Amino acid sequence: MSELLHGCGLRWQMGSPPPYWQGLPAALSRQARLLGLSEQTAGQQDEAAFSLHSPDFGTISTRLETEAGGMTQAAISELSMQAASGILSVHGRSSGPSGTLGLDYLAVLSSAMSLQATLAAALGQLRGGRFSTVSVSPLACGLLSIGQYLAGATAAQDPEQLLAGSYDPGLRPPFVSQDGVIFELETLDPRPWRAFWEAVGVPADLAGQAWKAFLLRYAKAVCPMPETCLRRLRALNFARLQELAVQTGMAILPVRTPPQRQSDSDYAALAGLWQHQIHAASDSFLRTLPSNADLPLRGLRVVESCRRIQGPIAGHLLALLGAEVIRLEPPGGDPLRAMPPCVDGCSVRFDALNQLKTVQEVDIKSAQGRQAIYELVSQSDVFLHNWAPGKAAELQLDAQDLHAVRPDLVYAYAGGWGQEQVDAPGTDFTVQAWSGIAHTISQTSDARGGSLFTVLDVLGGVMAALGISAALLRRGLSGSGLRVDSSLLATADHLAQAASPISKTGVSAVFQTGDGFMVIDCQDQTHLHALAGWLNVSPDAVWTVLPDRLLSQSALSLEAQLDVLGIPARHVPGNLAQLRADPRLASHFHDKGYSSVNSPWRFV
């Protein structure tokens, strides 16, 4: 299957990324290739990170705003940016404050969001706008990725006090069997949960306590399990646990290594991040931009029917680009609206992902509800859902059904497993386990498994939005409707290729300071010698002397000193509320009764 933008005549050219963030140009190149963009090597670039060229619209230059947050370009790296944006803080809630992801996560995420905005600007030009320059803040991309956690930590009423390192990483999923197999459990229904724990010998009251923590792990990035539950699992071998899981309806998956994932039959056959099909549209027209439109997707309509995180984030990104997003919810509204903490009767976590959308309540299982969706789609440009596999066809709301209503529709499915057949719900933590991502993260964290930060739900939503933006541009260039599918597993496979290289200096890690933790990312010998000079020791003695020196000063003071040396370094906030209190980050937030993250994009 060809790439989404293959044959559209689009060329891109790399510019000058931050010198110590090599994961960023690597991620940009990989994603541009997967989209079908041809690389242009001739000519010189200015300060733009990259540019997009086409005979159908003017050149679009995309620049990275790297000065926000008080960091010089030389002090920017994957680790320092993960610290500055709060990603390491959320990860550290259950994995320990000194743990890292071991992946170029923010590079992959920022690249995708940069490309999404660039493709949207190209579509804006086709529709009559003047969007020649795009500015992207990678720091804001990172802040947006933890938006729901930040909302919970900064709510005006009953904010959550979930501090990095305050939960024992040994008392959380994934679990361990008697024979040493590390594994994940998953169910979206409390009945299999109760039956499974009864079968392994856990009292009902403890199983209920564990269920509450297990259910909230998506929202809070912590999952404190009763020790009795873990002990009962360690008393049984994995084969027996698999038998009990089958008997009770619980999903169980081992935490696999990346080579195990790469040996799967579907791995080599994957065409990339997106699967797509073209639907020829005979009466397509390019909807022009409204006059004085400030964002490139103004005037376009998206119908979204999604739960949890992955799909809603995709819809939120499209809304930030100017699209009108109509969110379909069941009669009575989405129950997650009531999840505390709340402001004005709405969950701040829910609002962080859905604040820009309008809501229409629809019973999608009824003929009347289905007809209402048909009528909406007939006047819309995108239909986005993340229903369980097969449900769309069952509801007569699959791509062929909706293309019959609107031939040039972009029909988008944000799924879990993609084409892979796995006997488990395709959720963040099951996909982390199956794909090898959890194992990779465990190598650089204090925990035995992956992150309880929803790394794949968030990144999967970004990839879904990028696929939709590319499909909209292709529709604008060719007049064709499309179906575009993305998945958490394809996202995980893509992310797995972006494992951070091991530092050659031995001092790229999270360290304890006099008032908390901080990242120091000493990447090369130049950094090592600068650090040695700062400590007034030989390079061989840096590792010995550094910990005591750091303990004698505050993280903010150390940040300033190391920044002068050009060494990437950043404080890791213990509480996300510290991000809001940092005056260097003030421009990235607005107050909604919690700290809501502003758009990472600016268009000129």
Image: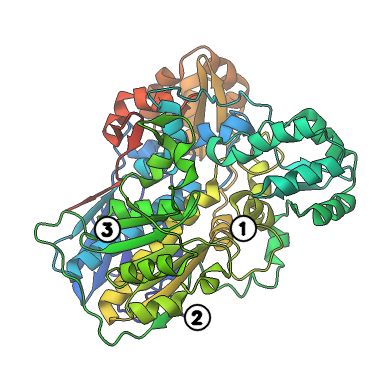
- Mark 3 vs mark 1: which is more N-terminal? 3
Which mark is nearer the camera, 1 or 2? 1
Q: In the displayed orientation, state which residue is furthest to the top.
A: 552
The residue drawn where x is 82% and y is 33% is 203
Which mark is nearer the camera, 3 or 2? 3
Location of residue 187 with respect to 447 vertically, above or below: below
Please provide percent x and percent y for residue 387: 53, 62
Disc 3 from disc 2: Cα separation: 29 Å
Callout 3–callout 1 Cβ contact below 8 Å: no
Count of labels in the image:
3
The type of residue carrying mark 2 is Met
Describe the element under mark 2 as helix, strand or loop. loop
User: In the rendered image, which quarter is residue 360 located in?
Assistant: bottom left
Q: Is residue 360 left or right of residue 332?
A: left
Please provide percent x and percent y for residue 544: 63, 22
Please tell me the numbered disc located at residue 212. Answer: none
Please tell me the numbered disc located at residue 323. Answer: 3
Q: Which residue is mark 1?
A: 426
Q: Which residue is mark 2?
A: 1
The type of residue carrying mark 1 is Gly
Q: Is residue 487 left or right of residue 353?
A: right
Location of residue 108 with respect to 581 vertically, above or below: below
Describe the element under mark 1 as helix, strand or loop. loop
The residue drawn where x is 46% and y is 29% is 341
Disc 1 from disc 2: Cα separation: 23 Å
Please provide percent x and percent y for residue 222: 61, 33
Q: Is residue 232 left or right of residue 250?
A: right
